Image (spheres, helix red, strand yellow):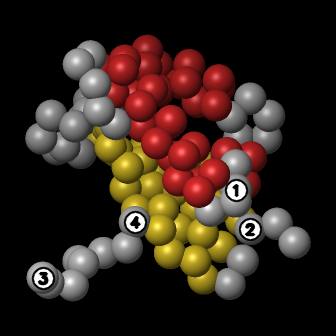
């Protein structure tokens, strides 16, 4: 068995880095929501919450999905003091959305 190519999550000091997370589902909307749910789950597995996310990079297969799919979920999952965000249009081979996140580990 070979060594993993990358880490799903990596802690460095008081910072937690999440590798790109892609949602699953039959529709674009379900893929987007599942991406957020999976990020939430990874954070919770590490004793954190969405409130601890300070930076996210969002890769969209179609940048025009930002107002219809991404922004409403962003407001729902980050209602107060949302993290910084960069959106990039990228060839995701049908993935439609991938998000990397950086979370601050509270004292």
What residue is shown with label 1?
48
Q: CA distance from mark 3 to mark 4?
A: 18 Å
Residue 34 locus on image (x, y percent):
41, 31
Q: CA distance from mark 2 to mark 3?
A: 33 Å
Q: Horizontal placement of 40 versus 4: left or right?
A: right
Decide which of 39, 64 is in the foreground and name it. 39
Q: Return the mark for residue 1.
A: 3
Decide which of 45, 17 is in the foreground and name it. 45
Q: Secondary structure at mark 4?
A: loop
What residue is shown with label 2?
105
Which residue is at the far front?
1
- Residue name at image x 70 percent, y 56 percent: 48
Mark 4 burial class by Cα count in 10 Å: few <14, some 14-19, many 20+ = few
Q: Is residue 36 above or below residue 64?
A: below
Q: Return the mark for residue 11.
A: none
Residue 66 in view: no
| Between marks 1 and 3 in the image, the one whose residue lies nearer the viewer | 3
Q: How many marks?
A: 4
Q: Is residue 1 above or below residue 107?
A: below
Specify which label sits upstream in the sequence, 1 or 2.
1
Q: Is residue 99 above or below residue 34?
A: below
What residue is shown with label 4?
8
Q: Secondary structure at mark 2?
A: loop
Dot 1 and dot 2 residues touching (CB under 8 Å): yes
Q: Horizontal placement of 14 versus 67: left or right?
A: right
| Between marks 2 and 3 in the image, the one whose residue lies nearer the viewer | 3
- Residue name at image x 70 percent, y 49 percent: 49
Q: Secondary structure at mark 3?
A: loop
């Amino acid at each position: 068995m070979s060594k993993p190519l990358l880490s799903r999550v990596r802690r460095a000091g008081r910072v937690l880095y999440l590798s790109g997370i892609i949602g699953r589902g039959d529709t674009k909307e379900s893929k987007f929501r599942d991406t957020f749910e999976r990020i939430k789950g990874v954070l919770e597995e590490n004793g954190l919450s969405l409130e601890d996310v300070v930076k996210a990079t969002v890769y969209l297969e179609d940048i025009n999905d930002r107002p219809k799919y991404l922004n409403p979920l962003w407001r729902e999952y980050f209602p107060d003091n949302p993290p910084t965000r960069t959106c990039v249009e990228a060839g995701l081979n049908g993935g439609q959305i991938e998000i990397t996140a950086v979370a601050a580990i509270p004292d």
